[in-house]
Image (spheres, helix red, strand yellow):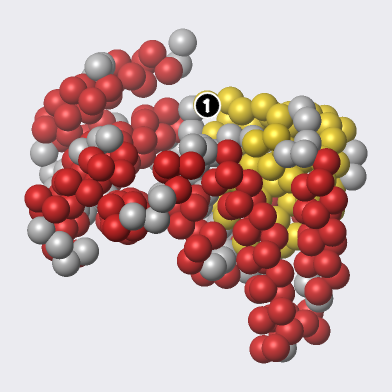
Amino acid sequence: MKKTIPTYDLNDVSQHGIVVERVEKRIVGIEDNLLDKGVHRDSHYIFMFLETGYAKMMVDFSVIEANEPSIFFLLPGQVHQGLVMDEVSGWFLAVKTDLLSESVRSVFEESLVEAKPLAIGPDWIGKLNSCAAVLQSFCTDEMLCAKEGFSVVQSLVNAYTGMFAYNFLHDIKSEILKESRALQLTRQFRIQIRKEFKTLKSPSLYAEVLNISPGYLTEVVHEATGKSALYWIHQEILVEAKRLLIFTHLTVKEIAHELGYNDHAYFTRLFTKLEGRSPSGFRDHSKR
């Protein structure tokens, strides 16, 4: 086991930050390089449309399976591994974060939807197939190297990924979708946590970044999620700590330092309080 979790970048396979491939009956070609790399992270988004077949993956400690027409996604930074791809047909899209629209990114980055396969109906199968095929047809060097051509490709990427966002949002309760001020601020807060959780540990620091009072941040986050602002900060820290405990052999002290804690004893107490067992106990338990 390595000291770090390998992170792969699209620059290794695409100078334009996008790879779109049709998969027929099995994984072939570029998808092997992008998906079958053992336990790893990616610095980009992955969107998968499973039209037929069976797929099984490990994503951040959970095993997810799909065996009917469905869509699913992977966020940048999520630890994952492809386990089984059996007679899979569909589409695979890997795309750099900055090529996605803010509205599409907001759906996934704020964790308002779960990163698990979502079944889709026959009408969406045709729409996704058509859009993906058009997108692939425009992903040529000639188009991607021209400013106007690249703009067309980016618009098609946003249309295709927008279909994913629409379906995932449509699947959750309508009251969650209300565009209240509380929800807007909570979205911004969750995005900032993903970026800054190693350095900013308290709600007051995030309130300062968002130009609001700590009390107001606490109020709106609780209104939108039912949880405190501190809860979401701790959850981001906890998930990353678990990733490092399971997928690396860093010591607890090294993990604490990686997460921004100079006092590893404090980190151990915090982890134990949040998880119900010590970091070492969690690591030992996960190996059983």
Quadrant of residue 253 in the image? top left
Q: Is residue 173 visible?
A: yes
Q: Residue at x 80, y 84 (%)?
A: 142
183 vs 79, nearest the viewer: 183
Give percent across and percent down for residue 57. 64, 31
- Residue at 71% of width from left, 79% of height from top? 152
Residue 24 placed where, x, y %? Answer: 89, 45
Which residue carries the number 1 mark?
62
Residue farthest top in this picture: 288
Give the residue drawn at x 66%, y 81%. 151
Crowding around mark 1 (Cα neighbors within 10 Å: few <14, some 14 to 19, many 20+) is: few
Q: Quadrant of residue 209?
A: bottom left
Q: Which residue is farthest bottom?
A: 147
Q: Is residue 200 left or right of residue 104?
A: left
Q: Residue at the location (41% across, 35% down)?
A: 243
211 vs 142, left or right, is: left
Q: Nearer the viewer, residue 129 or 177?
A: 177
Amino acid type, residue under disc 1 in the picture: Ser
Q: Position of residue 183 (x, y in %)?
A: 33, 52
Is 266 left or right of 76, judged from the image as shown? left
- Could you say whether the residue bearing mark 1 is in a helix, strand or loop? strand
